[in-house]
Image (cartoon, grey):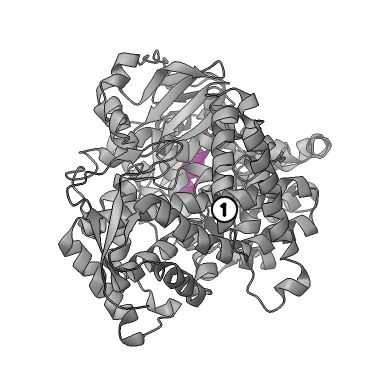
Amino acid sequence: MESTSVQFPIRLAEELILLMLDEQSGYLEMVPGWNFSCVMAGAVLADLALEDRIDTDLKALYLVDSHPTGDNLLDPTLKEIAESGETQDTQYWIERNTGRSDEIVTATLDRLVERKILDYESGGFWGLSRSVSRSGTYPASDLKVRQEAKARILSVILNDDSIPDPRDAILIALMHTCDGFKLLLEPEDYEDRLERIELVAKLDLIGRTVATAVRDSTATPRTRRVIQAKPIPKLRYIDILRQRDFRSGNIPKAMYGIFRNHGPVLELPFKMRKSRIIALMGPDTNQWVNKHGRFYLRSKDYIKDLESAFGASRTLPGMDGAEHYRMRKELKSAYSRSALARRLPELVHRCRQSLSRWSEGDVLRATKEFQNHISSQISHLTMGVDCSHYVDELLEYEHRALVTQVQGALPKFMLRTPKMKRYSKRVREFQESITTSHTPGQRKGKPPDLADAILGLHKSDPQFLPETDLTFPFVASMVASIYLGSGLAFTVYSMIRDPDLHEKIRKEAEALFGNGREPGPEDFTHDAIDATARLYMESLRVHPVIPWQLRMVMNECIVNGYQIPAKTVLLICQTAPHYSEELFKDPLEFDIDRYLPERSEHTTPGAYAPYGLGTHMCLGSRWVELQMAVNVLLIAYHLKLEVAPADYKLGINPFPTSAPNKKLKFRVAQIRNPI
């Protein structure tokens, strides 16, 4: 549905969303389903009645005026009623329009953001904007200001002397039909105010009629389709072996081949810790995870043993629901692009300092060199100290913990070998080096970093983030730097292999850094780094460093018609669509022009997901984009690199995350601009 101008008055559907919004979890209190769809469809019909386009009574719904309202939240339903030529009752039209529920919710959330009533946060979270939170009001139309929905409706419910206007009576009637007040009120308060709720719900004829139809549709639907769950196909080992791309390490391409041959939902022929594994792949399943994953999937189950290896019990990757939303909100500024932009001179300095170690004629092990190159930057920018000398031990300990605690590929005692015990001690030393360098005296006059944010949260609420949980986020940042180093190696390889593209990047670098210029954050505009940004986007499409993710099904769900029981492990192959011919023209070609505005192939819902899906989407994606752009541009400006040997064909090491294999080397052919 297209974006709608805020010229229209705030609609019932919008205020229903505001009433159902849980500020603690960042999404709706009510789980989407048939009942929810009926309520949203009923809200649209009630608004059409308030606009004098239809009239309703307990027996029938009548068309009064077929002229469009101009509001695309309402007009599709009005058009369908007008074109039907039939007289049906309200229940019929509610059930007929339940199919628009997702469309209505998406458009409503977008409109509330456009009105500046809600703020959207990456990962699919919404919250009241700062202005609404402070004032308790928002514009209902161009000329009117309305009290915030929850405060206004609760005032009507809790105050017997309050006389609601007709719209509020309709809202209360709709909320009551779906038991919405059970979510807004404490149980004893709900029981105490139930009589008042039922009284107000009957005050308005439109509200009473629509609410009755909604209640009938949820209790005894006439047209609701019964979805017959399909049996989940079982993949065989031979089906996996036939995918040559698995052997070459290209996980997204291999999974797309399986999707194309076998479908979007498959049971894999092996188990993880005695649990069956179901793989999801394709744009439709990506959209399902984005929209509904928060209600059915959980990350804690598969990551809790990894957390315990670092002495932690709760971490950002292992949290879900309100705790996860709070943690993201507390840390989002430290992970933001603006946080890195404020330290751009330091980023440039750290990058150049690392590049200065390379001399003309040097042959570099690409993956290892770039991982060290990025980890040095990340350690200074996020932890305030040089942690690069810890990286090898941290990475090996994390990888061993991953294969023993999560994948179960090795027995757990393999994490307790003498070598791993030494590395575990190094992990503790790593944390101590950070905490001792972040005392008030040590940090005086220095820009705040991620470690400051983590330690500040611990200090302000040690119960929410106890001392035992501090090590994991520090280690996670350094592990992430390894992934970024792998991504940089893929990106530079792709740039070098295309001379014309390489020249475009070099020209952007020359414009920014040439003649001794030291660009500021304001210089890194979209136009200034256009080709560089599209290069990195295409590299993430072709070579995503995290091609899949694990989740546990906590509530039975139906995905694409397949019923998946609780306690099933899900392997979400979110990057499989990256190789779809239907979504990307010539997907095997490395083509940065597919991100130009006139093509925008990546914007198709579910098509492009290099940063993950749903509520656990990468919090630092905007930081990463700027850091990668600066690094690619400085490499192109200062160095001319060549692939060594020249006939090398890219190989990929897929585990534990994707990286170019050890055979990829770069030769420094020329120092273009001395550092």
Residue 647 visible in the displayed image: yes
**Circle 1 Cα neighbour tier, 10 Å, few/some/many (<14 / 14–19 / ≥20):** some
Q: Which residue is mark 1?
A: 477
Taking 88 as reference, is 313 above or below it? Answer: below
Given residues 418 and 455, the one toward you in this image is: 418
Taking 306 as reference, is 650 above or below it? Answer: below
Task: Name the spot of residue 310 as percent of width and height, x first.
Answer: 68, 41
Given residues 194 and 596, the one toward you in this image is: 596
Asked if residue 562 lies left or right of residue 583, the reply is: right
Residue occupying image coordinates x 29% and y 56%: 666
Residue 166 visible in the displayed image: no
Q: Secondary structure at mark 1?
A: helix
Which quadrant of the structure image shows residue 304?
A: top right
Asked if residue 641 lies left or right of residue 559, the reply is: left
Image quadrant in which the C terminus is located = bottom left
Which quadrant of the structure image shows residue 348?
A: bottom left
Magenta stretch: residue 51 in it? yes
Which region of the structure is painted magenta?
35-52
Which quadrant of the structure image shows residue 514?
A: bottom left
Task: Name the spot of residue 673 as percent of width and height, x first.
Answer: 30, 78
Residue occupying image coordinates x 26% and y 39%: 579
Given residues 10 and 132, the one toward you in this image is: 132
Residue occupying image coordinates x 58% and y 46%: 393
For badge 1, the amino acid type reads Ser
Asked if residue 593 lies left or right of residue 375, the reply is: left
Magenta stretch: residue 256 in it? no
Given residues 561 and 311, the one toward you in this image is: 311
Task: Name the spot of residue 672 as percent of width and height, x first.
Answer: 26, 75
Q: Main secondary structure of the magenta part?
A: helix
Task: Name the spot of residue 458 as percent of width and height, x first.
Answer: 76, 55
Taking 55 as reference, is 379 above or below it? Answer: below
